[in-house]
Image (cartoon, rainbow, N blue to C red):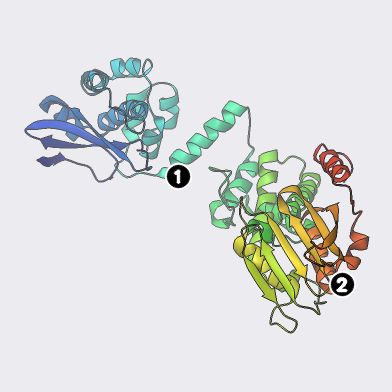
Amino acid sequence: MSEVVFTRGSGWIPSVVREDGVLKLRLGAGADANHEPRTFTVPVGEQHLAVIREDLGRHLLLWSALLPLCDAAGTRGRLDEEAAVALLDPVLLAAPADVDAYFRGIPWDRGPLIAHGAGIAPLERGEVCAAMRTATEASDAERAQEYSARRRRAERGTVLGPLDAAVLRYTGQYAHGATIPKRLPDAVDAALRPEVLRVVATAEHACAGLRIGRDPRRGRRGTDKRDWERMATTVESAVRRAHPGLADEAVRSVGFLMCSEAADRARSTSLEAYEEAADGRTVLSFADDKGAEQKWHPGSARTAAVAFWEFVEDRVGADNEVFQIEDEERGEAIQLYFYADSAARITAVREGRGGSEPEYRVEYGLVDGMSGYRSLVSAFVRGGCAALDGLGPWMPDHAEFERARRRRAAGGAR
């Protein structure tokens, strides 16, 4: 039987409960194998409860000192209860100077203290009790995130100027560089906002006319990695030229913003926008490496190329990266090997007679990214294997092709 004896407004600050007549501090921390928070308890006395109830700062300090022990317990290990109980008197009952000295010798988690309003300057001087004078029950997770970001930059030796920080706040990248960027003008100090907008305008001008295309090889929401890299390079180069004092991190964040917005536009653009108007005139069969097949007929609502790329989007995966288009009437096919940036064109040389197998000519070629695949498919559905002559070279010798592929992989001729 568990009874809550004392709790604070924030759901994550540890509570005191009574279980079978025993007072315990209960806290959620760490995670189990299913990534759900684990719950730990530590026996406490009435004297400890009195301090926890009356002194928010000491309560939070105890929490910060217990968290490393919870982390050490891992996903299924037991909390070191002896070590946890040993924290109670030095953190809750000792004089402030002794608490400061004690914290200099133990691991503790700054995050919750920063989030709950601890003074950063005294905290960094080791004056933990003084730092907790500004503590609040309400939590500000963003404050803790920004503090962690500043510490990480300091460890890397990165120094941000006011404009750098303002650009990162505008793009939402100040605390987390991997966060999907967005435009947050209200996050920027009004005095710096015009300068930030000039940086953004430079980036917009640099990528005008560039776009990021859809890449069916990456599924329905896939976009072309090469287009992204090309746009990022163009934007970053232009911003560095126009704003030479801007830190690399700020420059990259603006490039990330432009590319992310372009990728979003690509995902809402139909595949028809990327294909040539020319279409096939014969029945085509699409197939993947898992045995799925689909027929396309002239006059269908979708052009052959668009229908094929939709077929790819729906079925492509890490274990399904070989796709084929076959023109039975012509006796021709192409196979696309997405895992190797290559393709094969297959032409029937002689039909099978008297139970013999038909004879095919197979030629291999390297493909230059999604644009290369798109050109290959469009040409094939329009004119069969003959239309691929200008998209070679095509190599009938598989060993020669493998050598060419290895040279490309090593950075040689493409």
How packed mark 2 is, by other alpha carbons closer than 10 Å (few <14, some 14-19, many 20 or more), is some
- Say which mark, if any, is on residue 383: 2
- Say which mark, if any, is on residue 101: none
Residue at left offset 65%, top offset 47% = 253
> Whole-Å distance between the Cαs marked 1 and 2?
58 Å
In the picture shown, does residue 298 fall above or below 19?
Answer: below
Q: Residue lying farthest bottom? A: 299
In which quadrant of the rendered image does the N terminus lie? top left
Q: Residue lying farthest front? A: 354
301 left or right of 21 in image? right
Q: Nearer the viewer, residue 401 or 198?
A: 401
247 left or right of 35 in image? right
- Sequence-wise, the earlier of marks 1 and 2 is 1
Image x and y of residue 86, in percent: 24, 18
Q: Amino acid at mark 1?
A: Glu
How packed mark 1 is, by other alpha carbons closer than 10 Å (few <14, some 14-19, many 20 or more), is few
- Say which mark, if any, is on residue 142: 1
Q: Answer yes or no: is residue 220 visible.
A: no
Q: Quadrant of residue 198?
A: bottom right
Q: Amino acid at mark 2?
A: Gly
Residue at left offset 72%, top offset 80% = 297
Image x and y of residue 179, in percent: 55, 48
